[in-house]
Amino acid sequence: MQLVVMAAVLAVAGAWQGCSFGCHPTNVSIPVESCGSTELVLTTVCAGQCYHEDPVYIGHDDWAEQKICNGDWSYEVKHIKGCPVGVTYPVARNCECAACNAGNTYCGRLPGHIPSCLSF
């Protein structure tokens, strides 16, 4: 259940259309479901872009370290009225640009067009 809620949080955060360098906590509402009922929960996620430049030449040993917006997460429980089963959802406590951890995050290039903050 935690994985499903975390995926929903990240999808909502990804829908954010701003372009801001820096990583900061952002309030979002996410739907949680238990016992066939759905309610919105206000939580905090990490949002923003971390500065990154691709080197002109990438050799076998000099891959640029990728930074991602992440933070310290905790989990809280929401009880929906009339349902004995609580729903656990993530809450970002603080956010920072940190090295990408391939153990729990996709650190490769994303396929397709990625909007840029640069304006010409």
Image (tube, rainbow, N blue to C red):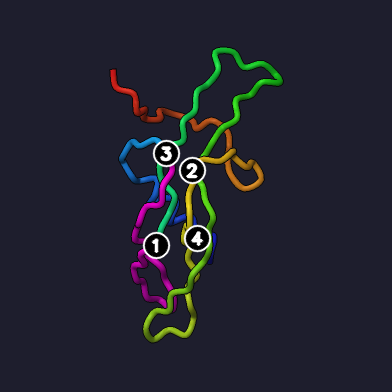
Residue 30 is inside the magenta segment: yes
The amino acid type of the residue labelled 2 equals Cys
Give the left or right position of residue 119, taking residue 50 as reference. left
Give the answer, above or below, for where 1 lies relative to 15: below
The amino acid type of the residue labelled 3 equals Gly
Residue at the right extreme of this rendering: 61
Residue 70 is inside the magenta segment: no
Of mark 4 and mark 3, the one earlier in the sequence is 4
Is the residue marked by circle 1 packed among few (<14), some (14-19), or many (20+) residues within 10 Å?
A: some
CA separation, marks 1 and 3?
19 Å
Is the residue marked by circle 2 packed among few (<14), some (14-19), or many (20+) residues within 10 Å?
A: many
Foreground of the two, 18 or 84:
18
- Residue 69's disc number: 2
For residue 115, which quarter of the picture?
top left
Residue at the left extreme of this rendering: 120
Residue wearing tag 1: 43
Foreground of the two, 94 or 52:
94
Q: What stretch is highlighted in magenta?
A: 23-42
Residue at point 42%, 71% (across, down)? 33
Element marked by disc 3:
loop
Residue wearing tag 3: 22
Residue wearing tag 4: 4
Give the answer, above or below, for where 24 lies relative to 77: above
Q: Given this view, does label 4 or label 1 mark the residue nearer the observer?
A: 1
CA separation, marks 4 and 1?
15 Å
For residue 80, which quarter of the picture?
bottom left
Residue at point 42%, 39% (across, down)? 22
Residue 85 location (% of width, % of height): 49, 80
Is the residue marked by circle 3 packed among few (<14), some (14-19), or many (20+) residues within 10 Å?
A: some
